[in-house]
Amino acid sequence: MSHRVVAMLLAGGKGSRLNLIAAKRAKPAVPFAGLFRIIDFTLTNVMQSGIRHVGVMTQYRPTSLMEHLGDGESWDLSGRASRLKVLPPHIGHGGSDWYKGTADAVFQNLRFLDNLQPDHVLVLSGDHIYHMRYDEMLEQHVSTRADLTMAALEVPWEDTSRFGVMVTAGQGEVTRFVEKSPERVSNLANMGVYLFRYSTLVDEVRRHCPEGRYDFGAHVIPDMLERRRVYAHRFQGYWRDVGTLDSYWAANMDALDSHSGLDLDRWRVRTNLEGRGQVFHPPVTIDGEARVSNSLVSRGCRIQGTVKDSVLSPGVQVMPGAVVQGSVVMHDCVIGEGARVQRAILDKDVVVGNRTRLCRPDVTDGANVDFPSHLSGGITVVGKGTRFPAGRTIGANVLVGTGLDEEAFPTDVPDGQSVV
């Protein structure tokens, strides 16, 4: 890039609507599409756009995320001319605290930016699945002499209440911005990708954060419209917020659909394969009687049964007679002989006993009685390290906790129940 741009990546999200799979890891660190983590997509965009300095603002359970990031080498963000720096909240220092919002996270790290003295600052979220060239956004930003350029995407009108939406005029100047309101003023949604003029960003966060106005969407941007040049940069590719269990499952299924727009090969997504020794896994083994169709099967997997329309992370074993269909199965799970896993999300190290059945694919609605807003699409979710006994039936919209042993399942589990 001819203009000096620094990226500030928001990666401290708790991911509460992802429930168990984000309970002990930051949402950007959640595995996705077999080999990857959610944050890999944003970091790959940064790398491919020629941005060489990145600050990653962490907060909630950052350990696995920090291990994954390493020194940034996996995304060519290490060395004399590049830098990836993890920026936790400054707990214990005067005037600092946990990040209270997106703008406050940047406010607490102005010293990092001041040391680099960029022309522009790109503020990004680490929990979206998309492929975007930020240098194209920069061209528009510079040509319009904008103080802020926001990436925007048209969404279905029925979904507008889930997003901040904007009204534009002329060459894309934003004239109105409404944050997550039932009022349907526009279907042009905020993607959480902000390109600020550096001096503007510093002035705005210093203006708002000391007054307790901590968020870009709720506070900073609406207030800027009367005083600053704010433009929308329209994006037309694949983009998905994977903040819910249903959207996370659906995005993994999109990775199997050549017509969805999610194209891992074309996007050339980078990741760090050192975790769990993935780099040392042998190739996939598919036995003679096994059947695999329309699935992502990662290194180290051994398939002796049937895998269909599913995503398998490294080290998964599918035993003879077992069926995995329409499911996301994370690292080193074992699906026992004759077992069936359908329309489910299994976190790492889950063992499904012989002949046990997880989920009922004919159920695509209803809700979990304990978490109806988290789990209502017919999926069953199993936490890390849980072991099922043989011969059980686990229904749809079931939430199964982390680290449970076989004694936690004395009987079958009906639809919509929780075992935690």
Image (cartoon, rainbow, N blue to C red):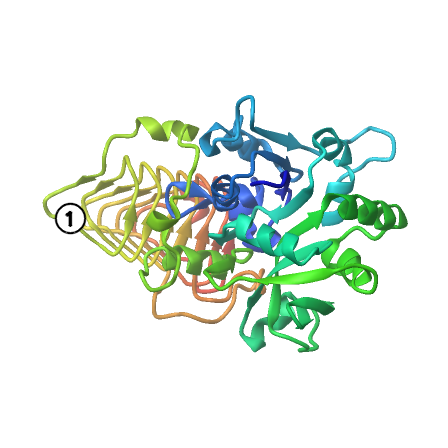
Asked if residue 398 is positioned above or below residue 383 in the image, the reply reads: below
Residue placed at 70% from the left, 77% from the top? 183
Residue placed at 56% from the left, 56% from the top? 243
Viewer can see residue 13: yes
Residue 378, image x and y in percent?
Answer: 43, 65
Is 376 in front, or is 128?
128
Residue farthest right in this picture: 211
Residue 214, image x and y in percent?
Answer: 79, 50
Q: Quadrant of residue 59?
A: top right
Left or right: 291 as drawn, with respect to 376: left
Left or right: 101 as drawn, with respect to 305: right
The amino acid type found where label 1 is placed reads Ala
Asked if residue 179 is positioned above or below residue 92 in the image, the reply reads: below
Residue placed at 48% from the left, 61% from the top? 246
Is 289 in front, or is 227?
227
Q: Which residue was labeled with disc 1?
A: 290
Is 170 in front, or is 331?
170
Assess disc 1: are there few (<14), some (14-19) or many (≥20) residues with their C-alpha within 10 Å of its C-alpha. some
Left or right: 386 as drawn, with respect to 357: right
